[in-house]
Image (cartoon, rainbow, N blue to C red):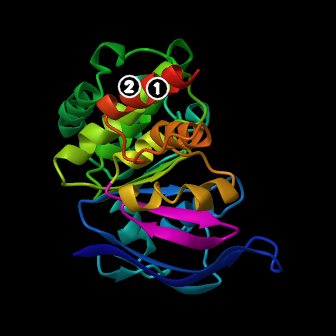
Amino acid sequence: MECIKVKDLAYSYDGENYAVKNVSFNIKRGSYTTIIGHNGSGKSTIAKLLIGLLEKNQGSIEIEGLELNMENIYKIRNKVGIVFQNPDNQFIGSTVRDDIAFGLENHCVPQIQMDPIIEEFAKKVNMSEFLDSEPGHLSGGQKQRVAIAGVLAMHPDIIIFDESTSMLDPQGKDEIKRFIYQLHQNKQLTIISITHDIEEVSVSDDVIVMNDGNIIMHGKPEEVLLNDKKLIDIKLDVPFSIKLSLALAKQGIKIEKQLSLEKVVDAICQLDLKK
């Protein structure tokens, strides 16, 4: 069953050039959807439209059966959490504990109930030992985990990760990607990840490819990622296995793009024998 329905969505920042043009898609409840595209393709604009940070120019957005409008916007924001790109810009509290507590305080959760919730979700993101730490003492990946804990503590139905690993070092990126994948395992949350990371795309349920404000592909990762020519044409990366198969093809060795380790080794051996 779809929990997000978007139809004919359009938005312009300046009233002339459209960042999103007549975009339509549905997202199933409990699924993990990645949205990819080069800078300026419209993917982050869609994230902001979905939570009402931007007001659409035309089209419709339906979240869990509610039309996104001024009447329903606060109900929808209770259902949708977002983790932004820069971890430094989203730390609100003076400590990890204060930051996780911020949303709970806004929802008037009594203090006696708040502490167990904070401890529960700090534990979920492996930040229990840092509850009294100041933000400046944390790595980028740790700050993002705190942001995720703050979102999870609000019990949303949907979490949007808006390029939440793009400013992290490789270790921080791996930490957050693993955690997103773990979140998806229980199928209770609907996850949308705006990303440039092809490895993340490959483990999602569905992928939406944006270019110049339009959706140019939407399907299963195995269908989209094998369309290497189209991805390369819009300057997106392709999985290593596909890059390898293309490189081998230039050497006269044709193998399937869905490579097993044995096929890779065999192809490289063939190449060595030709030298």
Judged from the image, the secondary structure of the residue bearing numbered disc 1 is helix
Residue type indicated by callout 2 = Val
Residue 87 in sight from this viewpoint: yes
**Which part of the image, by quadrant, shows the N terminus?**
bottom left
In terms of image quadrants, where is residue 67? bottom left
Q: Position of residue 229 (x, y in %)?
A: 60, 58
Residue assigned mark 2: 265
Q: Position of residue 11 (x, y in %)?
A: 67, 76
C-beta proximity under 8 Å, tags 2 and 1:
yes
Q: Position of residue 180 (x, y in %)?
A: 34, 40
How many neighbours does mark 2 have within 10 angstroms: few (below 14), some (14-19), or many (20 or more)? few
Q: Which residues are magenta?
A: 205-220
**Which part of the image, by quadrant, shows the C terminus?**
top right
Nearest the viewer among 63 and 122 is: 63
- Residue occupying the point 28% across, 59% down: 31
Residue 98 highlighted magenta (yes or no)? no
In terms of image quadrants, where is residue 127? top left
Residue 212 highlighted magenta (yes or no)? yes
The dot on residue 268 is 1
Q: Is the residue 211 above or below the residue 37 in the image?
A: below
Total tally of numbered discs in the picture: 2
